[in-house]
Amino acid sequence: AQRVTQPEKLLSVFKGAPVELKCNYSYSGSPELFWYVQYSRQRLQLLLRHISRESIKGFTADLNKGETSFHLKKPFAQEEDSAMYYCALSPETSYDKVIFGPGTSLSVIP
Amino acid sequence: KAGVTQTPRYLIKTRGQQVTLSCSPISGHRSVSWYQQTPGQGLQFLFEYFSETQRNKGNFPGRFSGRQFSNSRSEMNVSTLELGDSALYLCASSRSAGGAFAFFGQGTRLTVV
């Protein structure tokens, strides 16, 4: 079954500390993986996608097909990073829907 | 370029009533997906429309329905409302079918009393 899991519901780190939000997926093919972020009182927005291999707001994510993981990392957390983060999977065909993980609430302690 | 617009932003309904929510996608986007967001369940997929056709449907009862018009605007309807339908309903639009690279609206907060 196609599924996205985010094992941590809540994650608290101190400002300046490294942060890693975990995401694992189960999918039989080669999906596209995304991270979405929702800041307080703002709309859900795309943070980054694995294909572009870019760094957005200091965040990076590497797709590990062997471990079926797509963890989101940032070397030095900032207070403004506090938000809800969702990992999402888009199947390789357009016939299936995007699947979201349950989300991780990141709190950066000043 | 205008973003995804959802109306109304807030709604209060009583049990048993029905409700219609509206979503206007970004210009040029033909795919519209609907999600229910609750603190306990997170984001749950309701359905996706592309070119006026429902392409995918989530695991929601038949009380939840939707449609898409020729201008890509979409409506979602919930009949016989239950207390558990209280949630933030999000709409997302994208250029291609499947809902990838979606842009989200701010949502409609539905409260059922």
Image (tube, coloured by chain):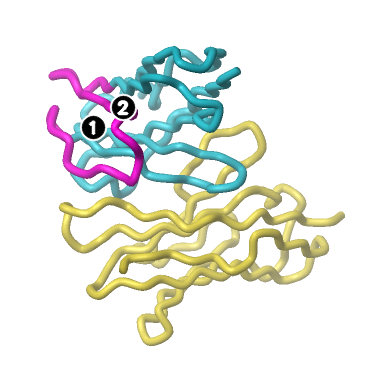
Between B93 and B41, the one nearer to me in the picture:
B41
**Where does residue B104 sit, x and y in percent of width and height?**
42, 35
- Callout 1: few (<14), some (14-19), or many (20+) C-alpha neighbours within 10 Å? many
Q: Is residue B31 above or below residue A47?
A: above
Establish if A76 lies above or below B112: below
Q: Position of residue A19 (x, y in %)?
A: 68, 68
Which image quarter holds the N terminus of chain A? Answer: bottom left
- Count neighbours of disc 2 (C-alpha within 10 A) and say few if under 14, some if 14 to 19, many if 20 or more: many
Q: Amino acid at mark 2?
A: Ile
B51 part of magenta stretch:
yes
Which part of the image, by quadrant, shows the C terminus of chain A? Answer: bottom right
Residue A110 appears left or right of A24: right
Percent position of residue B54, x then y: 17, 35
Where does the magenta region start and end?
B50-74
Q: Report x, y in % for residue B57.
A: 26, 42
Q: In this rendering, would B42 be left or right of A66? A: right
- Please give the letter of the chain rendered in yellow: A
The reply to whether dot 2 and dot 1 touch (C-beta < 8 Å) is yes
The one nearer the camera, B103 or A55, is B103
Callout 1 secondary element: loop
**Residue occupied by mark 1:** B29
Question: Mark 1: which amino acid?
Answer: His
Residue occupied by mark 2: B26
At 52% from the left and 56% from the top, the residue drawn is A102
**Horizontally, is A5 left or right of A78 in the view?**
left
Q: Give the letter of the cyan chain.
A: B
Is the residue at mark 2 from the same chain as the one at mark 1? yes
Residue B73 belongs to magenta span: yes
Q: CA distance from mark 2 to mark 1?
A: 6 Å
The foreground one among A17 and B68 is B68
